[in-house]
Amino acid sequence: MGSARELARAGRDAEAFEAILGALPSWRPLSPLHLAPIGLTWDRDLGRIMTREHREQLLTTARGFR
């Protein structure tokens, strides 16, 4: 998600979120209870772009599983 952080720092929020969505299919949960990469909400650079709509989209977007 390094490029998403760089885009967010540059104020290119829509592109940053698209980069997150693009990486989501390769995301892997840490446990069966880990439903989505919600840690992005607390990320210093990405947290501010994680609006309610973006969080909902993360929960409804297909992603990888082990």
Image (cartoon, rainbow, N blue to C red):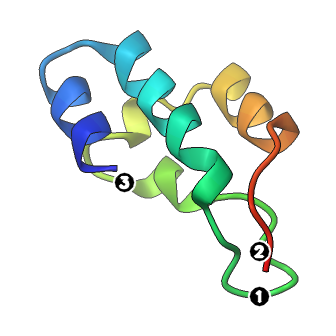
Distance between mark 2 and mark 3 Cα atoms: 17 Å
| Residue hosting label 3 | 43
Q: Amino acid at mark 1?
A: Ser
Residue at 79 percent across and 32 percent down: it is 56
| Residues marked 2 and 3 touching at CB (< 8 Å) | no
Above or below 40: residue 10? above
Of labels 1 and 3, the one closer to you: 1
Tell me if 35 is positioned left or right of 19 in this view.
right
Q: Which residue is mark 1?
A: 31
Whole-percent x, y for residue 63 in the image: 75, 52
| Crowd tier of the residue under label 1, counting other residues whose Cα lies within 10 Å: few below 14, some 14–19, many 20 or above | few
The amino acid at mark 3 is Asp
CB under 8 Å between discs 1 and 2: yes
In terms of sequence position, does the residue under pointer 1 or pointer 3 come before the other? 1
Mark 2 secondary-structure assignment: loop
Q: Quadrant of the C terminus?
A: bottom right
Amino acid type shown at disc 2: His
Q: Decide if residue 10 is on the left or right side of residue 49.
A: left
39 to the left or right of 29? left
**Does residue 57 sit above or below 2 in this rendering?**
above
User: In the rendered structure, which disc, 2 or 3, sits on the residue that comes first in sequence?
Assistant: 2
**Quadrant of residue 30 in the image?**
bottom right
Callout 1 secondary element: loop
> Which residue is labeled 2 in the image?
34
Give the secondary structure at mark 3. loop
- The Cα atoms of the two marked residues, 1 and 2, are separated by 5 Å
Give me the residue at 60% from left, 58% from top.
26
x 34%, y 50%: residue: 1
Picture residue at 44% right of the left edge, 55% below the top: 42
Residue 35 found in image quarter:
bottom right
Image depth: mark 2 or mark 3 in front: 2
